[in-house]
Each structure stands twice: as C-alpha cells, then as structure tokens.
Amino acid sequence: MADKANRHKENVAGAFYTDTQCSMCQLCIDSAPEHFKAEEDHAVVQKQPTTDEEKTRCQEAMDSCPAQAIGNDGA
C-alpha cells in the first residue's frame, strides 16, 4: 500500500499520488496517460482527476499497480 509520507515531491497536489515504491513499470502511464507521467526512475501524478470517468481510470491504475505505489488519500 502506498504511503503518503513517502510521496514523490513531483506529484501535483491532490488525492492521488505515487510513492517511493514505484518500480516504473509504466502500467499507470499506459492506462491513464493524461494523469501519470514518467520522471527519471518513477512515475508521478501530473494531473488530478476531476470527472468521474477520470477518477475511475486513476482508481483502476491504482488497483492494478504491481508495486502498490499509487495512493489516494481522498483529499
């Protein structure tokens, strides 16, 4: 499970984030490229979802993350 205390600083502010467990498998980028982007060796959230459809895509990316490195603190 992702730990908000270990969030990558490049994440935009908001509910969804990636943490230091990210192994850069790119699954989140493939499934929601408008919300996740690659940094040097990890992915980060570049845009928080605003619509229900976008929230669903981000939630699906979180649920399928093999490293469990995507979190949602509900903010």
Image (cartoon, rainbow, N blue to C red):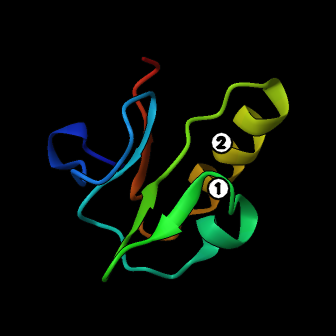
Name the spot of residue 2 as percent of width and height, x first.
33, 48
Judging from the image, what secondary structure is the residue with disc 1 in?
Answer: helix
Residue at 37% over, 79% down: 23
In this rendering, position of residue 56 left or right of residue 22: right
Which labelled disc corresponds to residue 59? 2
Answer whether labels 2 and 1 touch (C-beta < 8 Å).
yes
Judging from the image, what secondary structure is the residue with disc 2 in?
Answer: helix
Q: Is residue 40 above or below residue 53?
A: below
Residue at 56% over, 36% down: 48
Badge 2 crowding class, 10 Å Cα cut-off, few under 14, some 14 to 19, many 20 or more, is: some
Name the spot of residue 29 as percent of width and height, x first.
62, 69
Q: CA distance from mark 2 to mark 1?
A: 5 Å
Say what amino acid the circle numbered 1 marks. Ala
Mark 1 lies on residue: 61
Residue at 42% over, 28% down: 14
Residue at 24% over, 54% down: 8
Q: Is residue 9 above or below residue 38?
A: above
Say what amino acid the circle numbered 2 marks. Gln
Q: Nearer the viewer, residue 26 or 13?
A: 13
Kindly give the residue lying farthest to the top in the view shown.
Answer: 75
Name the spot of residue 54 as percent of width and height, x first.
76, 37
Q: Is residue 60 above or below residue 33?
A: above
Report the label total: 2
Name the spot of residue 56 as percent of width and height, x first.
76, 37
Q: Nearer the viewer, residue 38 or 74?
A: 38
Which labelled disc corresponds to residue 42? none
Q: Nearer the viewer, residue 15 or 71?
A: 15
Badge 1 crowding class, 10 Å Cα cut-off, few under 14, some 14 to 19, many 20 or more, is: many
Kindly give the residue lying farthest to the left in the view shown.
Answer: 5
In this rendering, position of residue 3 left or right of residue 38: left
Query: Where's the C terminus, which quadrant?
Result: top left
Q: Is residue 30 above or below residue 65?
A: below
